[in-house]
Amino acid sequence: MSHVYVAGSINQDITARVQRRPRPGETVSGESVSYALGGKGANQAIAAARSGASVDLLGAVGSDRFGEELLADLDAEDGLSTAHVRRMPNTSTGVALVTVDADAENAIVAVPGANATLAPEHVTDVEITGEAVALSQFEVPQPTIQAFFEWAQSRGATTILNPAPAEDVRDGLLEVVDYLVVNETEALFYSDGDADSELSMAELAATAADLRAHDEQVVVVTLGGAGVFASTPSETIELDAYAVDPVDTTGAGDAFVGAFATAIGDGLSLRDALDLGTAAGALAATEAGATPSLPRRTAIQDIRQDA
């Protein structure tokens, strides 16, 4: 069984379903509202645990009611430890306000709260083993992520970064990343491309080469309904998406990353790890919400066998 350490955000998700998202200054009627555990760190930790990994989550919540309830939700997940999740005094828990429209597309406002207080010393006191995977995202401070990855690599672990939401990257961070996982929008942002364009396979290969920070780094670009593209220093891999009827794409990217991290930790080939992640992402899009939609290992195996 793979062991995945996730340094990342923990949020209270508040999701409203609407026919369409409001324009600036406009109010629209919502169809429903739901409350759930979220944050890219928590989502990816749960996705990894449900896909078969033993997971340690390193993060922070506030001293409010949301923090208490979210810790209880995390503790209820089999295979996931919150021993390294801190409760920060006089601080609010992170909150994500999500709207999902009739086309199953989402828009999110994230308020970091306690996530912004996660510091390097909070993520470098963990005994990481050499066979483990260290995973992080951009909803906690970048200096903390870099310290976490440097510590993990010093212990012989593999590092995976999902630099989302997209933001400028601090110097030196990408040099300690073994696998860089971005979606197409993020790939365009980090390569200074046109955010409204669609990349051809040749352009994806060129973009991946531009993004690669060192000779051994693997760059993965998830393409939603178009599948996934990966570039190593010696080859490129293209996989189609699994055909599903999407209900809500919230959490699909996190499902991919968590399952991909599990597969890498299990020693699967890059192609098989990409396929496992793609199957998990497709399944996540078939249910509403972030955490509730994250699939379990049996469901992932079933859709792969039926394809």
Image (cartoon, rainbow, N blue to C red):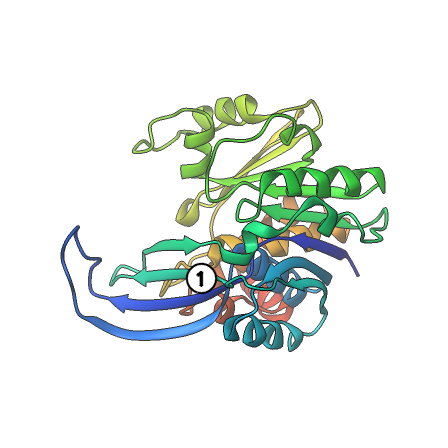
Q: Residue at x 28, y 75 (%)?
A: 32
Residue type at the position of mark 1: Val
Residue 7 x, y percent position in the rendering: 66, 52
Most extreme residue toward the left is: 26
Above-or-below relation of 77 to 214? below
> Which one is nearer the viewer's eye here, 159 or 247?
159
Q: Is residue 183 left or right of residue 85?
A: left
> Which one is nearer the viewer's eye here, 101 or 206?
101
Q: Residue at x 17, y 70 (%)?
A: 29
Using the rendered image of the protein, determine whether residue 279 is visible from the camera's viewpoint: no
Residue 10 x, y percent position in the rendering: 55, 61
Q: In this view, does 228 lie to the left or right of 194?
A: right
According to the picture, the residue beneath numbered tag 1 turns out to be 95
Q: Residue at x 61, y 25 (%)?
A: 171
Quadrant (top left, top right, bottom left, bottom right) of the N terminus: bottom right
Q: Quadrant of residue 56?
A: bottom right
